[in-house]
Amino acid sequence: MKSFKYIFVFFFLASLASCSSSSGNWGWYVIDPTTKSGLANIKFLIGGFGATILLSIIAAFMSIILGLIVALPGFSNNFFLRSLNRIYVEFIRAIPLLPMLFWVFYGLPVIFQSLGLKIEIDAFWGAVITLAISDSAFTAEIYRAGIQSISRGQREAAQTIGLSQFQAMRYIIFPQALRRILPPLANQFIYIVKMSAFASVIGMQELTRRANEIVVTEYRPLEIYTLLILEYLILVLLISFAVRWLEKKLGSNESNSN
Amino acid sequence: MKEVINIKNISKYFGKFKALDSVNLNVLKGEKVVICGPSGSGKSTLVRCINRLESHDEGEISVLGHSLTDDRTCLESIKSKVSMVFQQFNLFPHLTVIDNLTLGPIKALGVSKKEAKERALYFLDRVKIPEQAYKKPNLLSGGQQQRVAIARALCLKPEIMLFDEPTSALDPEMIAEVLEVILDLANDGMTMVVVTHEMGFAKKAADKIIFMDDGKILEENIPSIFFKKPKTNRSKKFLDQVLNH
């Protein structure tokens, strides 16, 4: 399965390269590492990896914590707390990422200003906050599904051996739910990596922004955006492999009769 | 003899369905009570009310002198004194057998790790599977899993044991090994309330047999009379079906 992916990527690249030799539509010189300008372009484009990765990791981390904070009131017996969870999830889930990004980056500072707060939001943190909040609605639902998937019998058994509700969650429910939560959570990380491209529109110097800038100066959109797509492909494949490895280690793919 | 469970006129509704209808039952210390009856007759619900897995809507239940209410302190006072064995075992699949057994004593009763482990090994020996202590439950057969579940319940040193159809999910050849363990406990003087269809077990172990249908107790009798001369037509019909299979 793994080798299949590599072979696919190889053929994809090979077919693109062959296009360039047989027709005049492709101009790979723009990122030809043997020329000085080509090498400079490549360095500039690849330089966006750092920002994209950092942005995604911080946003994912915040989303994982925020999602748990949002999910917990959803298990309460209290109607008010449960409603808070539902309202947050439904509301945040309904907002498209781009408008939310604009609201956080351009709108939030206005609110801060009117409150007399001197908090500035730069492109990086604007993107991190937006991605984290937007994604937290989904991670909260992943937690909920994972925890609810643990059978009622487990909760009852925990109760009959004298555990409190908190202890039952801590020792019985959550450890079992975690194996089911991790794979979809990792999926969500892939989603964040891809959505981080939106940060380019508020001037964040990540992969997509850099690609746009070279396209404007070199006017070779086909080659540069092709490379951009490959850059994301590499990132996502790496995460996929890491997730598979993690799943194997945790035994998430084992069937569990209880 | 001291009365350990006293159920007065309890009723329980699931929506409009009346699962328990004015049920009265007394259990004395050391007594073995077997509850039988057709599916949906309210047997399990009654047992689950005794340790508050279900709450009753009308009437009163007192267990070991504590009246059962929603009050947390009442649950605290009976917790771990009433233990339960489920039809589906409900072992914790992510923990080894020994951890299944020690978790309750350590976390709920504050027993030291060392003592909890000794206790666990003692009861594993008692249910005749000491060699399985460090395995995960899914590597055990159904009968072994249920015996682990019984040992887990015993580790809390309960005063009352509840069994909710402990052999119904087992293959026929495994029923015997589980019943043997339960019978052994019964001979030891443990107070037990057992929901079961195993009439052979009831004959051997029960001090008292309760027959339920439609959420009501139709008959309460000693085994020797219940099996020879059941009081109601309904219990006679039930016995015919269960015994002639």
Image (cartoon, coloured by chain):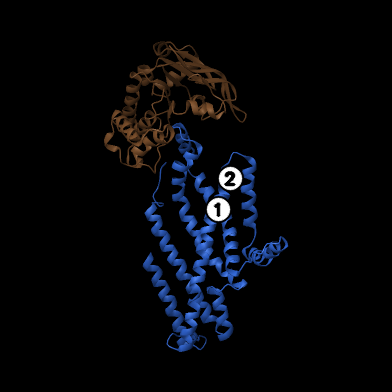
Chain colours: A blue, B brown
Residue A188 in the image, given as x and y percentages of width and height: 51, 59
Mark count: 2
Chain containing the residue with disc 1: A
Which residue position is annotated with label 2?
A73
Which residue position is annotated with label 1?
A67
Tag 2: amino acid = Pro
Chain containing the residue with disc 2: A
- Of the two numbered discs 2 and 1 on the same chain, state the one appearing first in sequence: 1
Quick one: label 2, few (<14), some, or many (20+) residues within 10 Å?
some
Residue A110 in the image, given as x and y percentages of width and height: 70, 65
Q: Residue furthest right?
A: A114
Q: Does residue B177 appear left or right of residue A244 in this picture?
A: left
Q: Does residue B181 appear left or right of residue B2 in this picture?
A: left
The residue lying at 55 percent from left, 82 percent from top is: A214
SS at circle 1: helix
In the rendered image, residues at marks 2 and 1 fall on the same chain: yes
The one nearer the camera, B16 or A85, is A85
Tag 1: amino acid = Gly
Residue A22 in the image, given as x and y percentages of width and height: 46, 87
Quick one: label 1, few (<14), some, or many (20+) residues within 10 Å?
many
